[in-house]
Amino acid sequence: MKDIRTRAVHVAHELEVPASRPLSVPLVQSSAFAFDSADDLARAMAGPDGDYVYSRRGNPTVRALERTLAGLEGGASAIAFASGMGAISGVLLALLRPGDQVIAQRCLYGGTYAALSDLKERYGVRVDHIGGDDAREFEALAGPRTRLLVLETIANPTGQVPDLPGLLAAARRLGVIGAVDNSLASPVLCRPIEHGADIVLHSTTKYLAGHSDVLGGAAVFADDALRREVWPRTVELGASADPFAVWLTLRGIATLPLRMREHCANAGLLAQRLASHPAVAAVHWPWLGTHPSYAMARKVLSGGGGLLSFDLRGGREAGRAFVEGVRLARLALSLGGVETLVTHPASTSHRELDEGALARAGIGPGLVRMSVGIEDPEDLWQDVEQALR
Ligand SMILES: *Cc1c(COP(=O)(O)O)cnc(C)c1O
């Protein structure tokens, strides 16, 4: 028998492979994979689809999430990342070169806006912003070096739903890659590839994982050729998904459709009641008939989503007081989890935007953002009402 030091390291690896299979996706928490043949190892290193070699390049648990997301979005394939920003930065860095142009929606997630500004300043990428409701504005700005169009299904926190079909069709005509951040809608409410997107981006941290306990991101590709182009750069970047985070995300995804139904129903009820409250100047939720994106939302979404925002008449002070006055809802920056969260974007998520950019993105000083959870809606309304008082 081998020495105990040797057995302590190796015995577990000699377990036989059973005939039955686990019911849940196995968590393969391994950084590297062992081979019997040097040739097999060499072959596995040749590209994105070889056998597993090293988990930064690929891992069975991570692959399960990639397949799941590609399936849910109607894409060909996907790459999972350590965070939503990992996915966004990975795709931008993989596809852009100095001198290229990106055209992006003006009202963007703050981190994406900052990443694009950085590309402009430090790497000589031209970045132009468009409103998102008129494809002609995009066509007028596009030129021979336009490489990417960046949109969000539901913009945060205005609830704007851009003209996905019009913009993505124009992008396709001009040979521009259309990328859509679908974090707020999730594939339950919208599948951007059906509207012509080439890449769908996700912060799986939000609705997909859904329990505020994990960070993750993903890029889903309509055509696998694009994944093959992006993959080597993302392996260099190293924002690879961790198997355990992915395992939690897969667990969350099983209940995504059920959760989305509750998020949408609760947000709808709160949006309606807030709209007739005297302290509230305006409510922004894309499935409210008064929202400027209502017609587009009805066309491309199958629900209004769980994120709503509203302007308090009392301005900045009222906004701060509200987020400190709620008792059930909690003041936290994230969204998409089972619990209701509130935030005041002008002083938190969108503080990267200067006053001008804030105003252009439609974010008022008294705007409160609410990620509506799956609690009982009457309990939620009671909490909102007492905080408004
Ligand atoms: C949160 C978020 C991101 C960034 O995702 P992380 O997982 O926090 O890196 C990107 N886009 C949208 C729309 C988001 O809400």
Image (tube, rainbow, N blue to C red):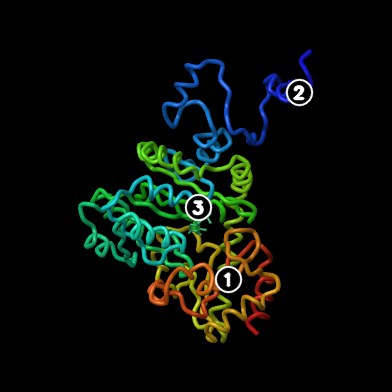
Q: Are marks 2 and 3 in contact (CB under 8 Å)?
A: no
The secondary element bearing badge 2 is classed as helix
Disc nearer the start of the sequence (2/1) = 2
Disc nearer the start of the sequence (2/3) = 2
Q: Is residue 122 above or below residue 376?
A: above
Instruction: Specify the amino acid type for callout 3.
Output: Gly
Q: Residue 348 or 262: which is nearer the viewer?
A: 348
Gap between marks 1 and 3 measured at Cα: 19 Å
Query: What is the quadrant of residue 291 in the picture?
Result: bottom left
Q: Is residue 103 above or below residue 312?
A: above
Q: Residues within 10 Å of mark 2 (few under 14, many from 20)?
A: few
Instruction: Specify the amino acid type for callout 2.
Output: Arg
For residue 212, side relative to residue 239 (left or right):
right
Residue 200 location (% of width, % of height): 42, 49
* Nearer the camera: disc 2 or disc 1: 2
Residue linked to disc 2? 5
The secondary element bearing badge 1 is classed as strand
For residue 304, side relative to residue 197 (left or right):
right
Q: Quadrant of the C terminus?
A: bottom right
Residue linked to disc 3? 84
Q: Residues within 10 Å of mark 3 (few under 14, many from 20)?
A: many
Q: Is residue 308 above or below residue 256?
A: below
Gap between marks 2 and 3 measured at Cα: 42 Å
Q: Residues within 10 Å of mark 1 (few under 14, many from 20)?
A: many
Residue 2 location (% of width, % of height): 76, 15
